[in-house]
Amino acid sequence: MEQFTFYELYADILQGTDDVSAGKLASCICAYEFEDREPDGEMTDKERFYWSNIADILKEVKETERAGKKPKKYDLQSRHFTFYETYYNAMKLLNVRKRGIFVKAICAYMFEDKPPAFEDKTIQGYFNLCKRKMDVSKKRKVSGSTGGTREKRIYAASPIEDATPTPQEMLTYEDFRAAYPDIQGNLFGTGQAYESALDWSDVALKFETDEGLRKERNIYYLARKYEQKYGQTRQANRVAKWDDLKDNL
């Protein structure tokens, strides 16, 4: 897995422990999700108690997400965000106490919108590198929640006479590249038209759910495959969604 759903319950547990315990528990969660490893280190009685209370949730959600489905039961019960493997890669470069500080800061930023104030420049640097992806994740979540579903987002009419309504939040090409830094290459020549033509919010959505798209590691071939399969340009997507919205009024 390259990502998993991180629930507020996990954050509450981490925030209620000291930095060392938080680092150990966060490492156990990530190792289980990304490496299929059960906790193998020594745990205190409190850490073992906390783990026992989330292990069943982790297992159920992991199986659901591996099957390509959304864990709706838990998604509806608790706030959550997408925890990417790059965050875990940063954690592994830190000692266990600093891991706790780092992951607590991620939770505070994602759930409480609190920017961190690190004393350690190394942790600050790793956080800054991961922050781009956090910001895009937050932006996408706001965009998706404005109306509840992808088909019912809130639109704002433009003052231009024949204008098409535009969504309050749309991902740009730059936002998409920041969210997926492991996708290589650039858009050159005629491929540059994809930067403004494609609905990158929809590209991100399809990329998260379409296994065929997720296999593409080059941005040009990803954009071309998306266009061939879905044919969603910004303008066409907006018109279609506006027509759907009018039909439901």
Image: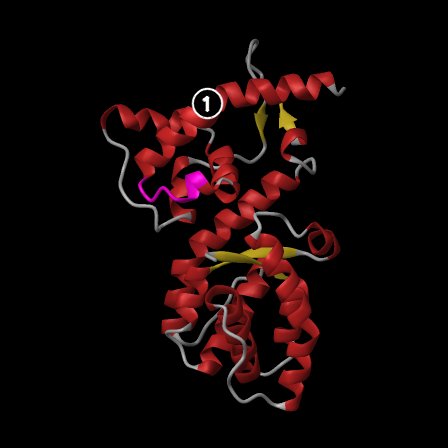
Q: Is residue 7 above or below residue 68?
A: below
Residue displayed at 51% across by 33% down: 202
Locate residue 114, reporting x and y percent: 57, 62
Locate residue 130, reporting x and y percent: 42, 59
Type of residue at label 1?
A: Gly
Residue position marked by numbered label 1 in the rendering: 231
Residue displayed at 73% across by 53% down: 73
Which of these two is toward me, 4 or 128?
4
Q: Residue furthest left?
A: 189
Locate residue 215, reporting x and y percent: 39, 44
Residue 157 visible in image:
no
**Residue 216 falls inside the magenta stretch:** yes
Relative side of 176 to 76, left or right: left
Q: Is residue 45 above or below residue 24?
A: below
Q: Is residue 213 above or below residue 194?
A: below
Q: Which region is colored magenta? A: 212-218
Residue displayed at 40% across by 36% down: 173
Relative side of 41 to 94, left or right: right
Locate residue 99, reporting x and y percent: 47, 76
